[in-house]
Every structure is written in C-alpha cells, then in structure tokens.
Image (spheres, grey):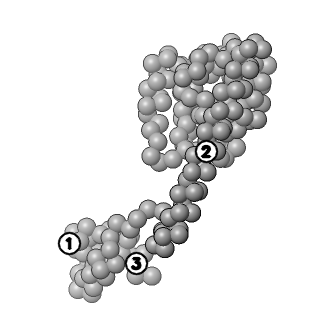
Amino acid sequence: MKYGYARVSTINQDLESQVNQLESEGCDIIYRENFTETKADRPVFQELLAQLKENDMLVITKLDRFARSTEDGIRIIKELFQKGVRVHVLNMGLIEDTPTGRLIFNIMNAFAEFERDLIVERTQEGKAIAKLKGNFREGRPKKYSKSQINHALELLNNHSYKQVEDLTGISKSTLIRSRR
C-alpha cells in the first residue's frame, strides 16, 4: 500500500498542492494534517505511522514535512526501516535502507533542521528590530480604524446590529468585542 502524508503548519501554507503531488504519485491513502512543526505530537502522523506495515511505502513531498528535528527524523526512519517500510521524499528521492541511503537522509535532514532554525532566527531578529521602532504590534493589523469602530458603535444607539453591519461592513462580533 502506498500512503501519502501532507502537512501544513500555518494558515498561509497550501495543503492542496501537497495532496495533488501525492495523488499524482499514485498514493492509495493520503493523510492530511494542519499542525505546527514545533509540536512533537502530531496525532494524524502518529496514526499513519501505526498503520504502516512491511512493504508499504510512505510518500511525503518534502523532508521538512517528515520530522521536526534531525533526531526525530533519524528515530522515525529507523522505526520505519525496521518495519520494512519504504520512504519516498518527492524532492529527494527514495530513501534506501543502506549505509549510503541513511547517510544522505541524515545529512539532508540536518540541513532541513538548519533551514528551519535560520527562519526562526531571522523572524526573531525582524521582530526585535520592529519593536525598536516603537509602534510594533504583534499579530494581524486591525481591519478597522478606531474612528470607524466608534462611528459604528454610535450607530448602535439607533440601529440594530444587522443594520449597522449592512451600513459599515463591520460584523456584529467585532462590534460586541469593541464594546467591552
């Protein structure tokens, strides 16, 4: 049996492109997961690993979808090889249970972890620089200005939430949160 595993860790990432790649590779069953990569306990992935047996193949699009660290990747690949499961990383090739295959996997896995670490480091540096500028705000920017919200709240004195929402485009839930 050929199993595929697709995972995204942020809202902006595209799960469907991974699924399409796995489908074109002929995967019989595709497991999908939306989970932050820093979390070790990925329930769908754990379910998939428990399902795999001898002569099955696990297909993933990229190595960084497979493991969250080099140590984690080495442990998982050893367990899969012991079960007789073949592993195919689409952007890397078939991982063979040979000394050379394991070496290449370990090196590529270490590079994937290094790349993740660099991304985190650059993100933290960017935040630190932005915080120095004084007007830094964590998270998404506000959709509506303070004056737009105040205007909508004033309209609530004479109109229903539905009417104010139709007039301003500001949702009832946003107005309720703003009243607090």
Name the mark nearer the viewer: 1 or 2.
2
- Counting every numbered tag in the picture gives 3
Disc 1 + disc 3, Cβ < 8 Å? no
- Amino acid type assigned to the residue bearing label 3 in the image: Ser
* Residue 140 percent across, percent down from the top left: 44, 62
Label 3: which residue? 178
Of mark 1 and mark 2, the one earlier in the sequence is 2
Front-most of residues 114 and 8: 114
- Residue found at x 65% / y 33%: 111
Secondary structure under tag 3 reads helix
- Asked whether, in this view, residue 65 is left or right of residue 179, the answer is right
Q: Do we see residue 29 in this rendering?
A: no
**Tag 2: amino acid:** Leu
Residue 27 position (above or below residue 14): above
Neighbourhood count class around disc 1 (C-alpha, 10 Å): few under 14, some 14–19, many 20 upward:
few
Label at residue 118 = 2
Which disc, if any, is residue 167? Answer: 1
